[in-house]
Amino acid sequence: AVFYSCIYGNIAQYIQLLYSSELRYRQRMEELDEFTRFHDITPMLQKKVRRYIQFQWAVTRGIDIDTLAGGLPKHMQLEIRLQLNQRLVEAVDIFAGCLPAFFEELVSKLVPCTAVEGEPIFNEGEHGGRMFFVKRGQVLVRKGGSLIATLKEGQYFGELALLTDRPRSTDVIALTDIILLALSRDDFEEVLELFPDS
């Protein structure tokens, strides 16, 4: 009896978590509908925003990792970030040979962002202030309208923005719904100040 009550208790708790997550999602979509009606947003833009929120929800289930990790001790926050993202940063050629502490600092500076299929990440000629790591999905890299590369999970782009002040030399467009991690030049320079020999 005790065994079955534990099983049923766990199942009930799981169902309640699913229900609360679904309820939060429905509330979010209702808020979106109200917002788009009130501001008379065009149907095309409504569809784009709705798709973005649906993708973001599918990835996170409404859980903000920064909020969740924010309640943990600093060393645990760092451990979570390292486990999730360290391999992405270590794969970058310009960071080859850097100390483990350098990578820890870089990982702590990464900011997640999402984009839906067809959305531009940046365009040729724009000022570049961030580099990006592909956490999930694929992007197209084009120059002058010609396809240069398709980048997938574990790859990166825009790294010249950390080193130079030149405009972007390519267009980068989301081929699928994607999750990216961004590293800004300001954050990169802060890390370099801590590790001047890197």
Image: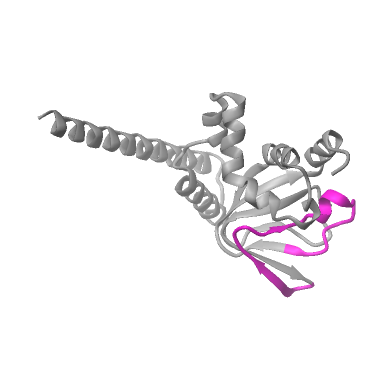
How many numbered circles does the render carry?
Answer: 0
Look at the image and say whether residue 167 sits in the magenta stretch: yes
Q: In this view, does 148 lie above or below 184?
A: below
| Spot occupied by residue 108 in the image (x, y as percentages of width and height) | 68, 37
Residue 124, quarter of picture: bottom right
Tell me the quadrant of the picture where the N terminus can be found.
Answer: top left
Is 28 in front, or is 97?
97
Point out residue 68 in the picture as x, y percentages from the top left corner: 51, 30
Q: Identify the residue at horizontal 76%, vertical 42% (top origin).
A: 99
141 relative to 53 in the view: left or right: right
Does the magenta run of residues contain 108? no
Q: How is the image coloured?
A: one colour
Task: Give the x, y percent position of residue 136.
Answer: 56, 56
Drawn side of residue 28 relative to residue 143, left or right? left
Q: In this view, does 145 lie above or below 99?
A: below
Q: Residue furthest bottom?
A: 146
* 143 and 184: which is toward the camera: 184
| Residue 58 horizontal side relative to residue 152, left or right | left
Residue drawn at 48 percent across, 43 percent down? 60
**Split into 4 quadrants, where in the image is the C terminus?**
top right
Q: Which of 85 and 113 is in front in this view?
A: 85
Location of residue 143 in the rendering, given as x and y in whole percent from the top left corner: 78, 70
In the picture as drawn, the residue positioned furthest to the left comes out as 1
Q: For the point 84% across and 39% down, which residue is it?
A: 192
Query: Which segment did they paint magenta?
Result: 144-171
- Nearer-the-camera pick, 29 or 182: 182
The residue drawn where x is 62% and y is 44% is: 112
